[in-house]
């Protein structure tokens, strides 16, 4: 199936690894030019090289910190200056620290807001004029299932990403006449390095032991973790002309683990 993305230009955050890398790689495989964004320059450069080698497409490294207002503006400006247009914005990054809500001070809350919410607000605001100029476009936000089904100690992410869901729904109403769609994807347990970091039992990024893996897998009706490519598949569809009638929606990709009717 040709998704009709050839010649489109996308910005993808958190693109040096995991879900962000999978999204950038698939968009490039479908013929899009991709500005890949991450904080650390060296891993990002390696990721860009892999995308170019695997797909023969064009990819641009933009090392930046999305928690910075100036960097958000620079990301969009750099991508547009290089590729001369912009059609797709994928807001994706890591997540704030885990912990009890009562123990986070104002500084921790502010960092979480800058990372999860304000980055989406700023990048979308800077992207919108270019999406309009292109005759329409796509904004896709990556959050997590915990937004819809909160988990203890994930409160910084839940609270700030819940703001993203509300922002995205409202923005979708305001830009629909411009043929710009805005959607949010909430992955469940996906096989990335972050899974080990969050659910491991030690410092750094420990491996999950067999019992922990079995318990986590048992909680997923499909009986396995998802893959970054499975998230990328939905994002690519939403970013394509085939997704033109889908906007203001929130999707959970979780192997059936979500416990709500919607």
Image (spheres, rainbow, N blue to C red):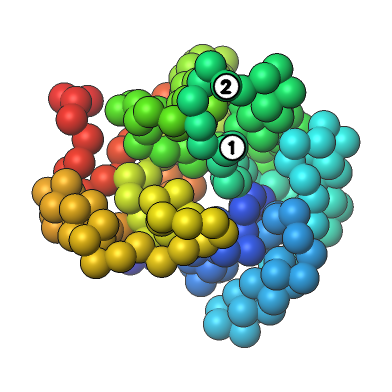
In the rendered image, which quarter is residue 213 located in?
Answer: bottom left
- For image coordinates 71% across by 66% down, the residue present is 44
- For image coordinates 70% across by 55% down, the residue present is 37
Q: Residues within 10 Å of mark 1 (few under 14, many from 20)?
A: some
Q: Position of residue 110 (x, y in %)?
A: 71, 23
Q: Mark 1 or mark 2: which comes first in sequence? A: 1
Compared across the picture, whether 177 is left or right of 135 comes to left
Between residues 96 and 66, which one lies in front from this camera angle?
A: 96
Residue position for label 2? 103
Q: Position of residue 124 (x, y in %)?
A: 67, 31
Q: Nearer the viewer, mark 1 or mark 2?
A: 2
Q: Secondary structure at mark 2?
A: helix
Between residues 218 and 247, which one lies in front from this camera angle?
A: 218
Position of 68 relative to 105 (above/below) = below
- For image coordinates 41% across by 38% down, the residue present is 144
Compared across the picture, whether 260 is left or right of 83 comes to left
Residue position for label 1? 96
Residue 106 visible somewhere in the drawing: yes
Residue 176 visible somewhere in the drawing: no
- For image coordinates 49% across by 41% down, the residue present is 142
Between residues 106 and 145, which one lies in front from this camera angle?
A: 106
Q: Position of residue 230 (x, y in %)?
A: 34, 59
Alpha carbon of mark 1 to alpha carbon of mark 2: how far?
Answer: 14 Å
Q: Position of residue 259 (x, y in %)?
A: 18, 30
Q: Secondary structure at mark 1?
A: loop
Location of the N terminus (image quadrant)? bottom left
């Amino acid at each position: 199936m040709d998704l009709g993305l050839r010649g489109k230009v996308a910005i993808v955050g958190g693109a040096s690894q995991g879900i962000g890398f999978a999204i950038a790689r698939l968009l490039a495989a479908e013929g899009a030019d991709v500005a890949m964004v991450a904080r650390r320059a060296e891993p990002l450069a390696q990721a860009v090289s892999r995308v170019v080698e695997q797909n023969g497409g064009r990819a641009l490294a933009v090392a930046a910190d999305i928690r910075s207002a100036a960097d958000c503006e620079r990301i969009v400006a750099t991508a547009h200056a290089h590729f001369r247009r912009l059609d797709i914005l994928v807001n994706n990054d890591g997540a704030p620290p885990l912990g009890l809500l009562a123990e986070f001070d104002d500084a921790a809350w502010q960092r979480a807001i800058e990372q999860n919410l304000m980055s989406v607000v700023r990048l979308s605001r800077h992207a919108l004029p270019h999406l309009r100029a292109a005759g329409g476009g796509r904004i896709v936000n990556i959050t997590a299932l915990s937004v819809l089904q909160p988990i203890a100690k994930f409160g910084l992410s839940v609270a700030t990403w819940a703001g993203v869901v509300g922002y995205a729904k409202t923005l979708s109403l305001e830009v629909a006449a411009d043929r710009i769609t805005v959607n949010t994807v909430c992955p469940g347990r996906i096989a990335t390095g972050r899974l080990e970091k969050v659910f491991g039992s030690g410092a750094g990024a420990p491996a999950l032991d067999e019992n922990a893996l079995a318990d986590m897998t048992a909680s997923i009706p499909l009986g396995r973790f998802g893959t970054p490519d499975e998230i990328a598949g939905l994002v690519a569809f939403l970013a394509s002309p085939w997704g033109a009638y889908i906007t203001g929606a929130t999707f959970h990709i979780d192997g059936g683990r979500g416990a709500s009717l919607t």
